[in-house]
Every structure is written in C-alpha cells, then in structure tokens.
Image (cartoon, rainbow, N blue to C red):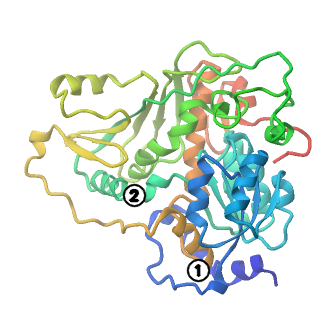
Amino acid sequence: MNRRDFLKRTGYAGAIFSGLFGRRAFGAPDPNWRKQSPNDKLNIGIIGTANRASANIDGVKGENIVAVCDVDQNYLDAMLKKFPKAESYRDFRKLLDRKDLDAVVVSTADHCHAPASAKALRLGMHVYCEKPLTHSVYEARTVAKLALENQRVTQMGTQIHAEKNYRRVVELVQSGAIGKVTEVHVWCGKGWADGRFIKEEKPAPANLDWDLWLGPAPQRSFQPGIHPANWRKFWEYGGGTLGDMGCHYMDLPFWALKLRHPEAVEAEGPPVHAEGTPQDLTVHWSYPAREEMPPCTVSWYDGKSRPKVLSELKAKDPKEIKYDNGVLFIGDKGMMLADYGRHKLLPEENFADFKAPPPTIPDSIGHYNEWIKAIKTGGTTTCNFDYSGALSEAILLGNVAYRVGQKFTWDAKDLKAVNCPKAEELIRREYRKGWEL
C-alpha cells in the first residue's frame, strides 16, 4: 500500500460520510485534529512557483516539498534555493507521474488549472488549486466530479473565505438581520482588459519554455508581455477581471445565500473582442429560491462600472460609503455593505440598537491548514471542489454571456445555454494534443 492508498483508506474514509463534498462542507473542521509527528508530513508537489504561487507555497511549506515545477527556469532556480532537496521539473505532467506524491498545489495560469488538477485527481492525489478553479464551465464540472469519484480532499484558493469578517456577514444574512435578500451587487475596481496578440515573430527568452507555458492552449508564436501576469487579459489563458476577482467577492453572496446554479445569465460591456477581455463589465445572474430563501439576482461590476444604488448611498453619506471593492446585500428589512475586512448595516439609524447574534460559524484554523488537516484526518474543507466548482461555473458563465452577446437560460444539469448554440464552444474548449482533460 503506497502513501496515497494509506491516506485514502484510513483518514479519508470517514470524510465521505461526513459530507465532505456536499453542503455540510461549509461547516467547521473537526476540532479533534491531532498534532502530526514529523513522520506524518505530506509529500507535496508544487506546480507554479512564483507570484500568486508564493503565498500558496508559504501556506504548505511545513510539509515535505519534494517536487517543484515551473516553465520559467529563473523562477524554478529561485525556488530550488528555498527547497534544495526538491526535484525540479519544467513539465507538470512529468511531475505528476511521480509515485510518492500525496498532494499537489496548482498555481499556474488559469488555462492550465484543469489539466493539472484533473490528472492529479485521477492519479489519487489531493489538490489545492488557485481560483478560478478552471478556465471553462465544463472543466469546473469535470474537476469537481473527479474529486468526488476519486475521494480526494480539495481546496480552491479563495483565501479570504477563512477570515472572520466573511463569517460574520454570512451569520447576519442567514439570521435574517436584513430580512429576505432578493438583490446583491458586487463590484471590483480592477481592470484586466484589452489583450491583443502581435503577429510579429519574436523569440522567447531563454529562461521560458513557451510551448510548455501554452500547454492546452492553441499553438501560437511567442507573445512578449503575457508571462507572468498579463495573460489575464486574454481569453485563451484567463478571464479578465471577473475571472481574477470574481471568486473572491462572489464567494460571499454565494456562501451567505446558499447559491449554486443560476437560472439565467446576461451581461453588458464594451464591444466584444475575439482576443482580449473587457473592462467595465456588468453581469447579472438570476437564482431560484433556495430552502427558505426567495429568488434573487446577483450583479457584478468591474473597472469603472458601479451599481446605481451605490451612487445613491454615497449621495446620502459620501464620507462613510468608501468601498472601492465590495458587496451590497439588499433585503426587505435593510441592507448590508461588506468587503474583505468590514461590514455595516444600512441605513445605520435603523440599526442603532441592533445586537449581532452570537457567532455560529467557528473560526478557521487557516485556509491551507484546513486542507492539510482534512487530508491527514478525513475532515472537511470549506472551499472544496464541489462548492468552489459551482462558484467557478457561475463566474465563468458571466464571461460566456458577455461574449455571446445575449441573455440565456442555463440548464445546469446538461451544461447547456438554452437557445444559444454559440455558447457551446465557450462552455467546453478544445485542447492541444497531449494536454487533453
């Protein structure tokens, strides 16, 4: 029995029955987590070693980092100085062929998330993957299904989910502090936009394996400026501002309102460009009733785009409404404004004597520790691929609605945009040979 089988058959078995992949996965980790001896450390492989990956590596560095992979040799060399005993790779497919890995951390560009995560799951590894979980809707559904079928512990990189402020907001919404919520507005001032490919042939720098960087994406000559960050501006590799930040800010209403799959999606913004993502995008998702909660609409705004209701609130109290990024819940008894670290009930005079209910959602032991603990003991994670897969699907559908230029009804069961056949190629993409999902 190898390490993966041992962890699967011992610590993990109980997690299936405790609802690891269902709605109960939002609950607190098992408080009886025992301390691990040094011999219990996981063997972890790292796919992507710089930029966003730095924080992810820092979160798991207490385990055994036995393998590291990056298409950029400069980044790889820097990582090997920190983990000199680790074996290095340029191609994550070769790293995943190792027999001694218990888990992997995936921090690549979006277009490589699913191929790396899917192969790891099929090979029996536990997976931590950055947000959004995948590059396409079909990939999100597939990766979530693989996590369940292979009984693996997963976590998506929505780190703010583990902080106290989000927990208090969820408690207030679900306790009925602002009544029945039928409308939510989410905005972010970032702007990943206007990516454009150049036709001129240019050589890739010696440190970068451009073909491996492309991975499953269409073959294309080297494009300067895309690596390491501007890939977010291109549809072939990223999803613009919505793809970058949507999972962070939409996570709050998704959690608080027990959302899953929308019934309909529509979007508006500047003219669609075949290559580059837009700025000032607006998206609207319509959700059905859930349990005791009524139907609701959730709207997204990025760049300079903002909800009209926010302007009205600022006009009343410009000194207090200073949220460059935020979430506004609108209920039949009031409103709540929140961001990563703050929240307030509005109008404030109506809540002058309000007392928040006692906390019911226990504090997290840490976003990365949740994942590590669940692998070792069969506990739960709060952003497992069942939850975060559905969240990512919704985010990605917003970009689909914008690119097809029409509102559509969403058939979540069959992954179909009803009466919108041109959405099909955006819901499920093609892959280069050797990089299939």
- Residue 339, quarter of the rendered image: top left
Decide: marks 1, 2 in contact (CB < 8 A)?
Answer: no
In depth, the one of 82 and 45 nearer the eye is 82
Amino acid type of the residue that numbered disc 1 sits on in the rendered structure: Thr
Q: Please state the horizontal and vertical placement of residue 336, each as a whole percent of the image.
A: 26, 42
- Position of 397 with respect to 196 (left or right) is left
Residue 183, relative to residue 370: is it above or below?
A: above
In depth, the one of 411 and 132 nearer the eye is 132
Residue 260, relative to residue 314: is it above or below?
A: below
Identify residue for label 1: 377
Q: Identify the residue at horizontal 41%, vertical 47% (top origin).
A: 252
Q: Please state the horizontal and vertical placement of residue 127, each as a whole percent of the image.
A: 67, 61
Q: Identify the residue at horizontal 61%, vertical 60% (top origin).
A: 57
Question: Mark 1 and mark 2: span between their CA atoms?
Answer: 22 Å
Q: Please state the horizontal and vertical placement of residue 107, each as a whole percent of the image.
A: 66, 50
Quadrant where the N terminus is found in the figure = bottom right
- Position of 164 with respect to 312 (left or right) is right
**Which dot marks residue 163?**
2
